């Protein structure tokens, strides 16, 4: 019996804006000046907010969180491509995209401060909460997309996750069902090279993560995740295809987290300073700023004005967050929501907890 080729594939890599801010005119998306400035503002706001959160955590004013510095283009570029009626399903490093969607910064702080109330976004019901459980949001996103399809809604779902999630069963199950159902789902993998301290080379021997789309039978593309224009363009095309009945797409954004995985780990234990310095040269913010300057849309005065503006916005969010933390809270509220009705064992634990509190007082 002759041996025949059963299948073949190739994965494209999209880059529009290089690390020096030089744009490929043939590929440059048709975004207005207002859209470009909105995109840059979102990335700067995310960077400034991230820096402030790190300071708050180190000062003991907020809990452990996952910094997003270095990954702003992947988050904001993708979010730029969706509409208000679309669904936004984040992981835990999409600060820029969440702020673009209108999630109040104070709510983000409240969540990382340890209060689930921070996951409530009034008026933004199509924006899901931060998801820390790796990869578990992929089936959620596919299910939502299936519901949109069932209801014949002209909308799609944008779902984010990291490279580590592609080592999880949830990812493969969600990917397969999205393909089988042809659900309007756009899956954004933020490949930042590290799953906590596990490098990509120890997660997979595949040349790309985008090629995992091939096994599912759907389009997959790899993009420069630090190029906001490339991320936007790939996401926009995928969203348009999803809404027109073309099914899901997997987009691998090759990026890098410049800080720690979370404020609970020390990245110097598992990666070199030289590696970080090489990626700092690919920082998405300076390259986009250079691009805007070249188009005559930006200058030093505008930069300073923007930094002052977003600093005030971040300060306002911090004040709102800390004012809410100062309000008296029911010490035993944790026990109220374990079961829908009271349970003897839980009530015994509540009594023990309150008794211990009174001793400390």
Image: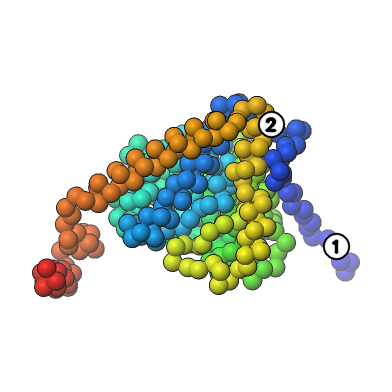
* Badge 2 vs badge 1, beta-carbon distance below 8 Å: no
Quarter of image, res 59:
bottom left
Image spot of residue 268 (x, y percent): 56, 69
Q: Can you identify the residue that label 2 sits on?
A: 294
Which residue is identified by label 1?
A: 4
Say what secondary structure mark 1 lies in. Answer: loop
**Which of 254 and 349 lies nearest the eye of the viewer?**
254
Judge left or right: residue 338 versus residue 294: left
Query: Which one is closest to the eye, mark 2 or mark 1?
Result: 2
Residue 266, percent across and down?
50, 68
State the residue at coordinates (46%, 58%). Answer: 66
Local crowd size for mark 1, using a 10 Å CA cut-off: few (<14), some (14–19), many (≥20): few
Asked whether 77 or 221 is in front, the reply is: 77
Nearer to us in this view, 108 or 153: 108
- Residue 148's tag is none
Q: Residue at x 60, y 30 (%)?
A: 298
Which badge, 2 or 1, comes first in the chain's sequence? 1
List x then y, in percent, for residue 89.
Answer: 47, 48
Q: Is residue 357 above or below residue 49?
A: below
- Residue 318 % position (x, y): 34, 46
Q: Quadrant of residue 359?
A: bottom left
In which quadrant of the rendered image does the N terminus lie? bottom right
Query: How many angstroms separate mark 2 from mark 1 (CA)?
Result: 52 Å
Task: Say what secondary structure mark 2 lies in.
Answer: helix
Q: Quadrant of the C terminus?
A: bottom left
Classify residue 11 as left or right of residue 150. Answer: right
Label count reads 2
Give the vertical position of 5 relative to 95 (above or below): below
Q: Residue at x 42, y 43 (%)?
A: 127
């Amino acid at each position: 019996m002759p041996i025949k080729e059963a299948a073949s594939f190739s994965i494209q890599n999209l880059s529009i804006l290089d690390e020096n801010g030089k744009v490929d005119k043939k590929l440059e998306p048709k975004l207005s000046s207002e859209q470009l400035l909105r995109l840059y503002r979102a990335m700067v706001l995310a960077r400034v907010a991230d820096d402030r959160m790190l300071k708050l955590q180190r000062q003991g004013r907020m809990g452990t969180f996952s910094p997003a510095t270095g990954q702003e283009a992947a988050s904001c570029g993708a979010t730029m491509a969706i509409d208000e009626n679309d669904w936004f399903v984040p992981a835990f490093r999409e600060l820029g995209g969440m702020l673009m969607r209108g999630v109040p910064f104070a709510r983000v702080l409240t969540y990382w401060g340890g209060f689930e109330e921070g996951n409530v976004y009034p008026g933004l019901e199509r924006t899901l909460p931060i998801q820390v459980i790796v990869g578990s949001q992929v089936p959620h996103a596919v299910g939502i997309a299936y519901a949109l399809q069932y209801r014949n809604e002209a909308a799609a779902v944008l779902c984010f996750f990291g490279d580590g999630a592609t080592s999880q069963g949830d990812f493969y199950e969600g990917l397969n069902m999205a393909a089988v159902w042809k659900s309007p789902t756009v899956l954004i993998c933020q490949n930042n090279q590290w799953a906590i301290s596990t490098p990509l080379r120890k997660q997979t021997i595949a040349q790309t993560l985008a090629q995992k789309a091939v096994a599912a039978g759907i389009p997959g593309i790899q993009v420069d995740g630090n190029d906001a224009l490339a991320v936007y363009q790939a996401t926009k095309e995928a969203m348009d295809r999803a809404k027109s009945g073309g099914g899901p797409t997997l987009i691998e954004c090759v990026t890098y987290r410049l800080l720690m995985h979370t404020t609970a780990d020390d990245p110097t234990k598992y990666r070199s300073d030289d590696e970080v310095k090489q990626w700092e040269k690919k920082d998405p913010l300076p390259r986009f700023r250079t691009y805007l300057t070249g188009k005559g849309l930006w200058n030093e005065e505008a930069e300073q004005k923007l930094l002052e503006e977003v600093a005030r916005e971040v300060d306002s969010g911090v004040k709102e967050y800390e004012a809410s933390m100062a309000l008296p809270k029911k010490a035993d509220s944790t026990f109220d929501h374990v079961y829908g009705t009271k349970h003897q064992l839980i009530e015994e634990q509540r009594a023990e907890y309150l008794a211990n509190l009174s001793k400390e007082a």
